[in-house]
Image: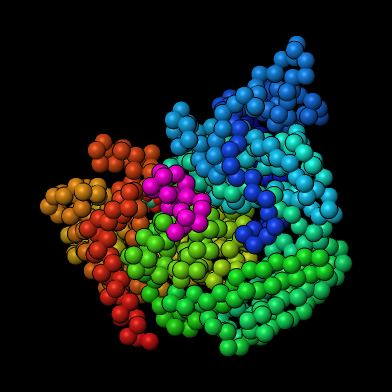
Amino acid sequence: MKSFQILVTLILLINIAVYSEAQNSLIINIPNRDTISLNGRWKYIVDPYENGYYNYRYQPIDQQENASQVSEAIFNDYHPINKSERVEYDFDLSGELNVPGSWNFQDDKLFYYEGNIWYRKKFDCITTHNGNRVFIYFGAVNYETHVYLNGKKLGMHLGGFTPFNFEITSFIKEKDNSLVVKVDNKRKKEGVPTLNTDWFNYGGITRDVALIDVPSSFIKDYCIQLKKGSISQIEGYVNLDGTNAAEKITVEIPELKLKKEFIADKTGHALIQFSIDNAVLWTPETPKLYQVNISSSESQVTDQIGLRTIETKGADLLLNGKSIFLRGICSHEENSIRGDRAWSIDDAQLILLRAKELNCNFIRLAHYPHNENIIREAEKMGIMVWEEIPVYWTIDWANEATYKNAEAQLSDMVKRDINRANVIIWSVANETPVSDARTSFLTKLISKARELDNTRLISAALEKHTVSENPPVFAIEDPFAQYVDVLSFNQYLGWYDGLPEKCTRSKWIIKFDKPVIISEFGGDAKYGYHADKDTRWSEEFQEELFIRNLEMLDKITQLRGITPWILTDFRSPRRLLPGIQDGWNRKGVFSESGEKKKAFFILQDFYNKKLKVFESKE
Ligand code: GCU
């Protein structure tokens, strides 16, 4: 590896090591905590040359001794105090952007902008110093983020789709705090995701920002779930932050008249185990959530938690011991009406109500962890969820920093949503080319996922293998398939491989005694473009494609779920056909403005039938 590459990797590893420390202290269950929202209008400065971060020798200013004295450094939010001073930026005179929101759709000049932008938010904090601690929390910022408060560097974060927080107790002032956030969404070979994806690279602070006010010793994260394979044993943990003494932890479920006490060790970690009976289990039909109160000497959090078990038995997928079929759909994190990243409860409702109309009980949130609002709304609506990390296509497998980044994204996704009953599958990859480096990368991720959570199923969206072209016979011959609980693969027969009629001639050889999920199939259609079924891009072609694919796939004996690609047309800079795509991937069964294409009704009908079949089995 050339000396410059070694240097870049080294800087990245140091950055990850030094600043991801902050990451270990991810605080969960933000929706139920005392928070002050910092959403709203933020000042911004577009700085493509990162002039406010690097000196003219291209050395990071914030790593210089006198960093806070360097007026050129935009993170200092410096204002000249006398007329002769030279400062070449000024947030007060700069434009504003909405947070949450990508910058791409708020300023036409930034539509395709991939680069560096500085955000600044001024705020007062009256709650300071009532002995409490204060953290700044970001739901997600795409992609590389450096955060400063009153000129002090808090830390950095890599990855556009997972939350992070920094403690600011010792840096916060009562009045006029200057929070400066450097955001760079440039795509990178060593990134996760890497250079090439089929979705729009929205840049900016795309989810909620909040101040979190907690006692000096507080409940940071926890897991209260049914033990694997048991409907009567709760097993989990509670982690305190800020304690150095064995503390009593109480877990209470008032509706079940349950109150249990545990002792945390000196590090603040408590193992939680207790039996439970006659609990109503969470199912799509009855998405029962219990109020759970967790308290320690100073801190108390409340959450709404569902109890269920999810397992496989041979090719069967068992929810609470009962065989289920996943009537699913894939979705990106986009409000197609607004044409921007989705983040709010309303955005979640827009997406989930469309899935409900299809009669779905399952949704694959592709290809990265979506916002917490959609997970929690889906849980209330009885929709099971597949979550994944953006280990997508050709990742830099041999790069240790890339692995660390992917693993950190996995850990944060699991930590944030480990108490969500509707999340049943963690997926570690999508359509990744088979190689030893790749398989060992993914195998390490799987063992990390199992270490973090042994109650859920692990999968990855694999690719098909062509056994023969004539007659068309396909199989899954991926060495990684042996490590997953659920065998999932994407296949595009009739779109990228032949025409819809090929489905009818095709055979599948699936040797695995595991549940099979078809994690993608489909084809593009422009809503309102009508022609005969052989005319590509027409609704009739897509309709025929769905008919033939569903017929073919339904013959796979291990089939226990499908998530066609995709719920709604979505933005992609790879889709350029004028008059048809115009920057949109048109594989939705809904158009971006919410119109139903003919394929919608084919899929809805297929699910109504599936539902009847599985209901009759009960
Ligand atoms: C791939 C990929 C998706 C992509 C889709 C398509 O399989 O996983 O991200 O959008 O195919 O080509 O439309």
Q: Quadrant of residue 601?
A: bottom left
Residue drawn at (67%, 42%), measured in percent from left and top?
Answer: 156
Please tell me whether residue 203 is drawn above or below residue 80 in the rendered image: below
Residue 453 appears in the rendering: no
* 149 relative to 458 in the view: left or right: right
Please tell me whether residue 310 is drawn above or below residue 617 in the rendered image: above
From this viewpoint, which residue is outermost toward the left? 532
From this viewpoint, which residue is outermost toward the front? 126
Image location of residue 603, percent across then percent down: 28, 65
Magenta range: 332-349
Image location of residue 91, percent across then percent down: 64, 27
Specify the color scheme. rainbow
Residue 285 appears in the rendering: yes
Residue drawn at (62%, 57%), measured in percent from left and top?
Answer: 412
Q: Verify whether residue 343 appears in magenta.
A: yes
* 616 relative to 301 in the view: left or right: left
Residue drawn at (75%, 33%), measured in percent from left and top?
Answer: 151
Residue drawn at (73%, 50%), measured in percent from left and top?
Answer: 135
Q: Foreground: 245 or 208?
A: 208
